[in-house]
Image (spheres, rainbow, N blue to C red):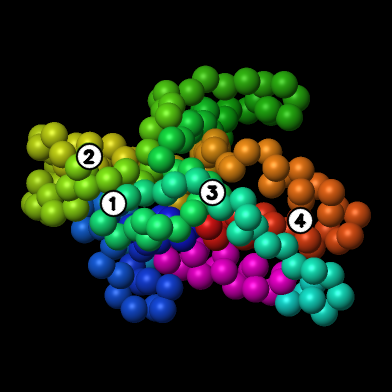
């Protein structure tokens, strides 16, 4: 997941070099927070290091590390900046975002005791990253992202960045992203008895992707 965000909107690439990414997406993300690209890159590095640590731990215990490559069968973004040929485990092109946290964090009621909260906004089946260059041209002038945004292409890209916003900045919003069927969950669950770290590694690897 984080790799997909980083390819398009991170400050640096996987080699820690300045990331050209998707210029229009970067501009839209920075409307939310000027440090957003760096935040995305830092979190991507964190997830990679977590997975590397857990993998090394499993090997030290004689356990075969988790390999999720066979489950990376989803097509990702075809927009400028994305690794277009990479298979994906998580689909950031069609997200359902739970925005009830806005009311939950302001309420004295406890969701663990059955309290339910309405959605602040209804975000259903919306992309959190650019889909392709036709839908959101990467060369849209940065000046068009200055509020109030009136250009249709810039407004579209800003809406996509706004959908991603609740996920990278705070983890406060629950994102429902399509995974590559239930086979991955089934395969992981069968290994629970081998090592709890095996499941943790699978979780980290999914977060990275």
Instruction: Look at the numbered discs 1 and 2 and tell me whether their residues touch, using CB distance below 8 Å.
Output: yes
Q: Which mark is residue 199?
A: 4
Q: What is the CA distance from the residue labelled 4 to the residue labelled 3?
A: 20 Å
Helix, strand or loop status at disc 4:
helix
Helix, strand or loop status at disc 2:
loop
Q: What is the CA distance from the residue labelled 1 to the residue labelled 2?
A: 9 Å
**187 or 129, which lies in front?**
187
Circle nearer the viewer, 3 or 1? 3
Q: Which residues are magenta?
A: 39-55
Give the residue number, with chain letter if any, for mark 2.
Answer: 135
* Residue 153 drawn in magenta: no
Helix, strand or loop status at disc 1:
loop
Name the residue at 35% across, 71% down.
12
Instruction: Look at the numbered discs 2 and 4 and tell me whether their residues touch, using CB distance below 8 Å.
Output: no
Tag 3 or tag 4, which sits nearer the N-term?
Answer: 3
Characterize the local packing of mark 4: few (<14), some (14-19) or many (20 or more) Cα atoms within 10 angstroms: many
Figure label count? 4
């Amino acid at each position: 997941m984080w790799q997909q965000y980083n390819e398009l909107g991170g400050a640096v690439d996987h080699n820690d070099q300045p990331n050209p990414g998707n210029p229009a997406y970067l501009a839209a993300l920075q409307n939310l927070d000027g440090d957003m690209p760096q935040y995305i890159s830092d979190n991507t590095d964190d997830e990679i290091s977590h997975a590397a640590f857990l993998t090394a731990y499993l090997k030290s215990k004689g356990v075969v590390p988790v390999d999720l490559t066979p489950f990376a069968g989803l097509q990702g973004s075809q927009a400028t900046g994305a690794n277009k040929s990479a298979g994906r485990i998580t689909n950031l092109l069609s997200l359902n975002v739970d925005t009830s946290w806005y009311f939950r964090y302001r309420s004295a009621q406890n969701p663990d005791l059955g309290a339910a909260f309405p959605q602040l906004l209804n975000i259903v089946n919306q992309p959190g990253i650019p889909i392709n260059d036709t839908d959101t041209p990467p060369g849209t002038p940065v000046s068009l992202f200055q509020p109030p945004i009136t250009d249709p292409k810039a407004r579209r890209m800003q809406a996509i960045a706004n959908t991603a916003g609740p996920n990278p900045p705070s983890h406060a919003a629950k994102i429902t992203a399509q995974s590559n069927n239930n086979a991955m969950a089934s395969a992981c669950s069968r290994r629970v008895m081998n090592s709890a770290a095996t499941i943790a590694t699978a979780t980290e690897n999914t977060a990275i992707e």
